[in-house]
Image (cartoon, helix red, strand yellow):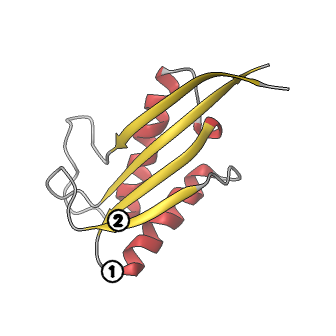
């Protein structure tokens, strides 16, 4: 039996580089992978990992379903065998100039 020790609510992992900007000219897939990389770093700061993510909401700034699918596939690849429940939504715009993808996440770390 596991007892829930911590919940972490990650509000918006964005595709930002080391300078705090969205790299110019990168694809939806590359932005999705960068979002996961930044999510992974934030989780690590909380002694958590992708395997601890209990839910995600993936936002893609596009009206083209192919872009949503491309972002989703890139994110699923990064999560590997951890099949986290998720919501995938197309939106009109996101907060940073050039931003196409954002991932909100809830992580739950169990205490044995």
Mark 2: few/some/many CA within 10 Å (<14, 14-19, 20+): many
* Tag 1 residue: 64
Q: Which label was assigned to residue 28?
A: 2
Q: Is residue 27 above or below residue 103?
A: below
> Of label 1 and label 2, which has the lower sequence position?
2
Give me the residue at 27% from left, 43% from top.
16
Image location of residue 102, percent across then percent down: 35, 52
Q: Which label was assigned to residue 81?
A: none
Q: Residue furthest left?
A: 97
Tag 1's secondary structure?
A: loop
Left or right of residue 29: residue 95: left
Q: Is residue 97 above or below residue 25?
A: above
Image location of residue 105, percent across then percent down: 47, 42
Q: Quadrant of residue 58?
A: bottom left
Q: Nearer the viewer, residue 19 or 44?
A: 44
Image location of residue 84, percent across then percent down: 62, 51
Give me the residue at 50% from left, 29% from top.
8
Question: Which quadrant does the C terminus fall into?
Answer: top right
């Amino acid at each position: 039996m596991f007892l829930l020790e911590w919940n972490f609510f990650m509000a918006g992992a964005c595709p930002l580089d080391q300078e705090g900007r969205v790299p110019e000219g990168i694809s939806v897939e590359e932005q999705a992978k960068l979002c996961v990389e930044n999510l992974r770093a934030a989780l690590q700061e909380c002694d958590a990992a992708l395997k601890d993510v209990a839910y995600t909401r993936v936002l893609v700034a596009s009206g083209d379903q192919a872009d949503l699918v491309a972002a989703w596939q890139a994110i699923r690849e990064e999560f590997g065998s951890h099949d986290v429940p998720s919501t995938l939504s197309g939106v009109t715009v996101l907060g940073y100039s050039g931003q196409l993808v954002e991932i909100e996440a809830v992580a739950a770390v169990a205490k044995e």
